[in-house]
Image (cartoon, rainbow, N blue to C red):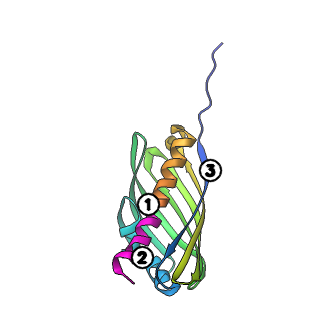
Amino acid sequence: MRFTRKRRTKIDMDIQGQHQIDASPERIWRDLNDPHVLQACIPGCEALRRVDEQHFECEITAKYGPVKTRFKSRLSIEDSVPPSSYVLAGEGKGGVAGFGKGRAHVQLTPQAGGTLLVYTARFTVGGKLAQLGARLVASTTRKLSDDFFSRFSARFDALDV
């Protein structure tokens, strides 16, 4: 008799966070929709181009533990309420390594001295990447998300807006 271990084929995860940014919601909104700013802030982003007003295509290289892969991704802006909120949805294919997809709701709330950016996201990673284990995949995805918003927030500190 032979036993086989069923391998995990996808991992779902939720991520949330917030950043206080010393800029107006209008200025932050403009940068959240600028492909040059997004490319500079997305970790591992090698190319990003606007397809139309609500869609982007990009190539991102990411490393999950021992697996490094290039994702060809398509992003779309949904439920846009300028300058206060939108949903950024995306799906990327990493060849034999697997796939990633997700939806992030971004909310901008004016506050004294700036804007509070709050995000909640739901991600799914599948294929060989999911076989690495939920803890590694979730921590790497969380780090990539935190790195994006930290880079994005730091832009405003550097600009002294």
- Tell me the distance, in whole angstroms, between the alpha carbons under discs 3 and 2: 28 Å
Residue type (three-letter) at the residue carrying disc 3: Asp
Indicate the secondary structure of the residue bearing disc 1: helix
| Residue 23 rendering spot, x and y as whole percentages | 47, 83
How crowded pointer 3 is (Cα within 10 Å; few <14, some 14-19, many 20+) is rated as some
Residue type (three-letter) at the residue carrying disc 2: Arg
> Observer-nearest residue: 43 or 91?
43
Mark toward the viewer: 3 or 1: 1
Among numbered discs 3 and 2, the one appearing first in the sequence: 3
Residue type (three-letter) at the residue carrying disc 1: Asp
Q: Which residues, given as a range, are shown in magenta?
A: 147-161
How crowded pointer 2 is (Cα within 10 Å; few <14, some 14-19, many 20+) is rated as some
Q: Which residue is mark 1?
A: 147
Q: Is residue 25 above or below residue 20?
A: below
Q: Which residue is mark 2?
A: 50
Mark toward the viewer: 2 or 1: 1
Which of the image's four quarters has the N terminus? Answer: top right
| Labelled disc at residue 12 | 3
Find residue 43 and report its image quarter.
bottom left
> Observer-nearest residue: 83 or 74?
83
Locate residue 124 relative to residue 34 in the image: left or right: right
| Residue 80 rendering spot, x and y as whole percentages | 59, 80
Which of the image's four quarters has the C terminus? Answer: bottom left
Q: Is residue 101 above or below residue 158?
A: above
